[in-house]
């Protein structure tokens, strides 16, 4: 009987010591607008301070063979606050030249 009490007490102690699952972060705002041509606007904001905004536009560019084709040009930004309370923001463009982020947090290449 003592063994059963000890085992039950140990199981209760383990259950109480287990970390609780964190509450999901609430979404304060979520907007999405899609145009028939493929263009869009998107925005998201959460209760923990994360913000993201993005737009996409269709652009016709020529490829290596000088043939036109459509690409989506994306412009946007996101921001968040780290665990130490410091804010961080990244703005970006993604187009036929690739993904081009800009932020104070991104190291800059040294000029020779």
Image (cartoon, rainbow, N blue to C red):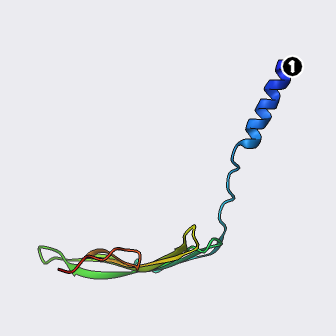
Tell which of 86 and 66 is nearer to you. 86
Q: Taking 97 as reference, is 44 left or right? A: right
Q: Which residue is mark 1?
A: 2
Secondary structure of residue under mark 1? helix
Q: Taking 36 as reference, is 16 left or right? A: right
Q: For mark 1, does the 10 Å Cα neighbourhood hold few (<14), some (14 to 19), or many (20 or more) residues?
A: few
Tell which of 56 and 46 is nearer to you. 46
Tell which of 22 and 97 is nearer to you. 22
x, y (%) of residue 87? 53, 77
x, y (%) of residue 102? 37, 79
Q: Taking 110 as reference, is 104 left or right? A: right
x, y (%) of residue 86? 54, 75
Quarter of the image where one finds residue 6: top right
Reply above or below: 4 against 51.
Answer: above
Figure quadrant of the C terminus: bottom left
Figure quadrant of the N terminus: top right
Q: Taking 64 as reference, is 15 left or right? A: right
Q: Residue furthest left?
A: 65
């Amino acid at each position: 009987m003592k063994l059963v009490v000890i085992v039950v007490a140990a199981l209760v102690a383990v259950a109480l010591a287990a970390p609780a699952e964190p509450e999901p972060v609430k979404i304060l705002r979520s907007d999405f607008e899609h145009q028939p041509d493929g263009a869009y606007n998107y925005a998201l904001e959460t209760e923990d301070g994360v913000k993201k905004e993005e737009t996409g536009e269709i652009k016709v560019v020529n490829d290596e063979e000088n043939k036109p084709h459509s690409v989506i040009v994306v412009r946007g930004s996101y921001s968040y606050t780290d665990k130490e309370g410091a804010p961080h923001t990244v703005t970006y463009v993604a187009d036929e030249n690739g993904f081009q982020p800009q932020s104070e947090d991104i190291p800059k290449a040294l000029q020779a």
